[in-house]
Structures are given as structure tokens and as C-alpha cells.
Image (cartoon, grey):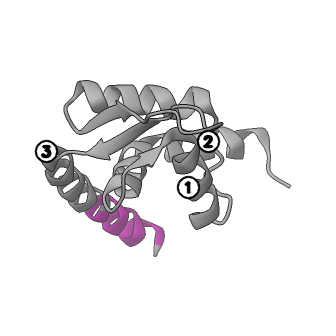
Amino acid sequence: MKGIMNDKYERQMKKGVLDMLVLRMLKTEVKYGYQIIQELREKSGEIFLLKDGTLYPILYRLEDDGLVVSRWSEAVGKQVPRKYYEITEEGKRALAEIVEVWKRISDGVGKIMED
């Protein structure tokens, strides 16, 4: 059973990697918001259960920073228009840098936790 403190620390740790994970989700394919939420949930073994209110501010921030661009799809039949997000070349470069930082942090934490 997880305690209140564990929940707090887990939320803080997850928050620190969300930009990296969202960029990674967009690295190989253009996606819409709900698709990103579903794939993060599935690929993480349900560790990352994002809500719209968590994902969209991340996407808007990444777009403001020039790391992703968005476009609306056309409505086809009964399908409603969807806003799709695509990583930019600058976003791909940023992702590579973020992954390197993540590896250094992860390695450093691992060395400390081995004691």
C-alpha cells in the first residue's frame, strides 16, 4: 500500500520526465492528444496515467518553445476534427539533449542508491 509521501514523491518524479516522454511519443509519428495519453498508459504499464489537464499544458508549452507544431485535421464523416501534434527538428534535437541529461541523472542516482 502506497503512503501519502510516496504519492507526493512519485508525482514529482513523473512530472520531471513528462516533456521528454511526450517528445519521445511524437518522435516517430504525428499524434493527437488522447492518442498520446493512451500510448503513455499502455507503454508504461499504466505508470503514466495522464489526464487532459496534465497533457495539454505540456503540449502548449512545447509548442510555444518551438519543439512541436500542431494542426487540425478535417472532419471526415462522423469523425470530429482532431488537433495533431508533430515534433519539429528543433524538438528532435532537444529530445536528444534531454535524454542525455536524463541518462546522467539516472546514472548518478543509481551510483548513490547502490550504497
Q: Horizontally, is 73 left or right of 104 in the view?
A: right
* Residues at circles 2 and 1 in contact by the CB criterion of under 8 Å: yes
Q: Is residue 115 visible?
A: no
Q: Horizontally, is 66 left or right of 86 in the view?
A: left
Q: Please provide percent x and percent y for residue 111.
A: 37, 71
CA–CA distance in space, label 2 to label 3: 25 Å
Identified at 33% across, 33% down, the residue is 70
* Residues at circles 3 and 1 in contact by the CB criterion of under 8 Å: no
CA–CA distance in space, label 3 to label 1: 22 Å
Identified at 63% across, 56% down, the residue is 41
Q: Please provide percent x and percent y for residue 84.
A: 41, 39
Q: Please provide percent x and percent y for residue 80.
A: 59, 32
Q: Is residue 108 magenta?
A: yes
Relative to 44, does residue 54 appear above or below in the rendering?
A: above
Q: Any mark on residue 50, and which?
A: 2
Label 1, on which residue?
40
Identified at 32% across, 62% down, the residue is 28
Q: Please provide percent x and percent y for residue 64.
A: 25, 24
